[in-house]
Amino acid sequence: MAENTPNYLDPEVLNTIAGLELKARLIVEGFVSGMHRSPFHGFSVEFAEHREYVPGDDIRFVDWKVFGKSDRYYIKQYEEETNLRAWLMIDTSESMEYGSGALSKIEYARHAAAALAYLITKQQDAVGLCLFDEDLRDILPPASSTGHLRRLVKMLAESRTGGQTSVADSVNHAAEQFGRRGVVIILSDLLATADQILDAVRRLRHNRHEVVLLHILDHEERTFPFERTTRFEGLESMPNVMVDPAALRTQYLKELDGFTRRLKKGCLGTGADFVAIDTKTPLDVVLTSYLASRGRRR
Amino acid sequence: MSATGTLQVGTAMLLGDAPAPPFLLALAHPGLLAAGAALVAVPILIHLFFRRRHRVVRWAAMDFLLAALRKQKRRMQVENLILLLIRCALIALLALALARPSTQALALSPFGGARATVLIIDTSASMAARRTGRTALDRASERAKTLLGDLPSESRVTILVSRDDSAGGAPRALIENASPDEARARLTALRTSHGPNSLAEVLRLAGRKLRELSGKPMAVLLTDLQRRDWRMDDAQRSGWREDVYASLRALGRGGNGPPAPVVVLDVGAAGTGNVAIASLLPRQGRQAFAGERLHLGVKLFNFGPTEVEGHVVPFIGREGEEGWTKLDPVAVQLEPTPGEGLAVPTLARVGVSLRDIPVGAARIRAVFQPLRGAGDRLASDSTRLLSIRVRPPVRFLPVRSHEGALRELRDAVVSPIDLGEPIYPAEFGDAKLERYDVVLLADPALELLEPAAIQKLERFVRAGGGLLAYLGTFAEPDKVNELFYKEKSQGLFPMMLATEPMRIDDESEIRFVPSRERDHPLFRETYESVVFFSPHILGFRRVADEFLVDPKFRQRHVVATYDTEAQDAAVIEHRLGRGRVVIITTTPDERAIRMRGSILPAVMFFNAAHFLSADDPKHRNGVVGTPIRVPLPPGAREVIVEPPEAAGGRIQEPVEDETKPFVVHNTGYPGFYRIRIRGSAGDGAGLARNDEFLAARNVDADEGDLRRIDAEELKRGYQGKNLHFTEDIDSVAPRGELDDRDSMSRILLGLVALLLLAELVLAGRFGSRRRSA
């Protein structure tokens, strides 16, 4: 791996995740096809055959139609496909620069994207990268080689922030290039209207992509902890305001909560995943928690 | 502000020029309120401070912030305002509580109800002294107007002036039992008088007037706090004027009426008076005889901090005529006033020869002239005037039997006096008595006087002549009684001498009455037979033991002191017809004692002569119309003279020759003339002294002492229950019936606690940021 990239592949983070996979083999059958069940297998599996149920099998896979006809329990067995295509869409707009803690939102997104790319590559699936702000900025088509991963991480490292967020336009343009269905993981602060974002999600879902919205907000953006009179200078051409934050905190959090609820509800309605991330939360915790819950859902 | 103060709402302080509406609160500690008022600004300043020192954050999630702001803006403004008001009120109320207010400060509050108010205005001459262009009476009038304007309209007011020249210098009421508006209108009639006042007298009058008014009583004295009104001149004496003190206390206690707060309002102005001639008085009596030498005492005060050397220059002139004769100056060295401000008087003795002064009214002027370079200012009264009556010399016809008696008399005389050519008793029958004023019987052998001579003498006295009988060793009581005594005081002697020596062992029988109290009942009853004794026991004993008055007359006698300070001889005085008989008995004069080695009769001729004059001496102070001479310091370029208010106008003239005194001729009005001397170009260059002083015309000698009593000293000396010495009447909260300070403070502290609670709750609701603020 390039010397300037280890920041985005934090060995501890990845080690924790890998360790978790190894230790939780019985729960999650593995990320990598052939060895484990992939957390992303839902859209890349083909039905293979039935076999008779034996105690210990997951009853979710019992074929109830066969049971209705034959009054016997059969388990559906699937054949894993290994040609999963995953797209990591990283928001590089100016608003992603904000950060009150150790990591800004963009840095957090870079870490997360790198970790996910590593995992996906490790399970020998293809992962691509798409950087966007007002529009698409850079695209790295999916591949599953180690060399590709290195290029992807390098591209992440060299990405620059700027411009305004336009999730809808970017996604629309990206969807034209994503081709056959895959997993689209969007890492963004989603500072746009909920309708625009949900429209974009619907568009992806219409193309049969699985969509994961990783809503990355800084801890201060989530809690609005300011006390003293503060002059907030808007990024992305937003106006400046001088306010007493304490007086606005409740209403601000209310606004944020309303926005998040709308997104969650919209995602739920379209079958997309929505994950709210606080940059203060360790990356490993976020990823393992999400991947574990995803695994449970399959 | 003083130790106390007043909060007024929406107006200037009471002392301001604009008429002020009634005040609401009086404060025990106005300084705390002032501090609190300043602290009220603290929350505002904190707010502004934090706005200035804001933090800057480049913010991404601006949509949510703007949305929140849109919805919260109005509410935040209201909340901010509420919190700000609460915090300001919190501090203000706390300061007010600590300042211990009273809503009933001297009841000038419109809610205080009707007030029975007696305003006492000091109208003594010193109130005409100007400072910064205004007299103390001007200030008193303004203060009185404001005060009356503040009184509830149903109040009743009596205004007293402390001295009115038209009332013989007594206090009188300017207006009685009037409404505040009527009383205000009468204030235009205020005038200063030409002499001193008696505070005790006017305070007693105030007590009587107060009882005639209905309403809650209050007495306000507006005065310049002139020292002489409050403190004795002589530091060795008791210091404070007991009569003033007693009158104040009596007024405060209310006499028979309810207690009345008495407020002494200072309307004077502190000055830097340095050297003043406080008094100019003859040392013996207040009339002089042509040809004599008149001895004057000039009392000077140096009120400044540095020693002053100079001269007292006496001048003499005829009343009603221009021109003065300068007499020999007397050098004086005036000690500086010590640190505590008590000036020690210096007494300069000035002798004025009346040898060349014709009979009639004369005037004497004493001027203090500092040595050049003495480096001190004269800011007070440095000129004194005195009018005297120069009487013709008394023509004596001494009748003696031996030279010794006459020598005794002559030796005992204070000032050289021409006793004339003595004759023997046998020669008396041929004497032409119309050439003489006084027949002096210098212990003659009375048996040598013929009855015809005695009748001649009696006619002489009845026609207005004087008889001075000195009874010495030749006097035989039997012969004296036979020749001089007739019943019903129809003889030359009003009583018989006892034929046997009489001793008065029980002196308690003797009543001593000051002879100046001519209206004393004892005088009225027995005036035709009055015995004046020296207050000194030696003199009394001598009379009683040796010269004897018949005991049968004793019950008719008034034993009186004539003048305790002058140490008059013991005399028996008797009026007969138009004339007067004085029987000289003995004297305690120390020179007589030394002269003869024992107590022997002697005569103070000088004083005795006064008795032989038909008219009582009259004292008139100051002379209007006499010019004021202003010695000019080097560098003087302009002189400004401000005459008494009644005269109006002012004189402003350039100095043409600074080596000559500047003369103010137009001094036709009594009172104080303020004289200011300016240096070149108005910058005062070269003027180290004499840049300002007051000269007086027709102002009482004591009244010219413009020293003020220190307010703190006054408080220490007089402060008592219901007595208030202040510059600010609004601060006065009477004790007892009116004082509600404690309850007011408790209520205010309760409000503070409530506000504090409200602030905590609201701040908690509105945001934690506010709590920390």
Image (spheres, coloured by chain):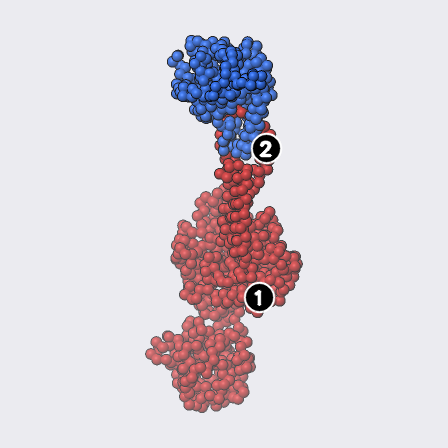
Chain colours: A blue, B red
Above-or-below relation of B5 to B540: above
Q: Which residue is mark 2?
A: B72
Residue sitting at 46 percent across and 21 percent down? Answer: A56
Which kind of residue does numbered mark 2 sit on?
Gln
Can residue A224 be seen in the rendering of this structure? Answer: yes
Above-or-below relation of B724 to A55: below
* Mark 2 closeness class: few <14, some 14–19, many ≥20 residues within 10 Å: some
Above-or-below relation of B267 to B563: above
Q: Among all residues in the image, which is located at the extreme left? A: B597
For the image shown, how many numbered marks are present on the structure? 2
Q: Position of residue B396 (x, y in %)?
A: 47, 77
Q: Mark 1 belongs to which subunit?
A: B
* Mark 1 closeness class: few <14, some 14–19, many ≥20 residues within 10 Å: some
Above-or-below relation of A287 to A229: above
Secondary-structure class at tag 1 = loop
**Discs 1, 2 touching: Cβ within 8 Å:** no
Q: Nearer the viewer, mark 1 or mark 2?
A: 2
Q: Position of residue B773 (x, y in %)?
A: 50, 38
Judge from the rendering whether residue A153 lies leftward or rightward of residue A73; answer left or right. Answer: left
Secondary-structure class at tag 2 = helix
On whether disc 1 and disc 2 are found on a single subunit, the reply is: yes
Q: Which residue is mark 1?
A: B258
Q: Nearer the viewer, residue B536 or B431?
A: B536
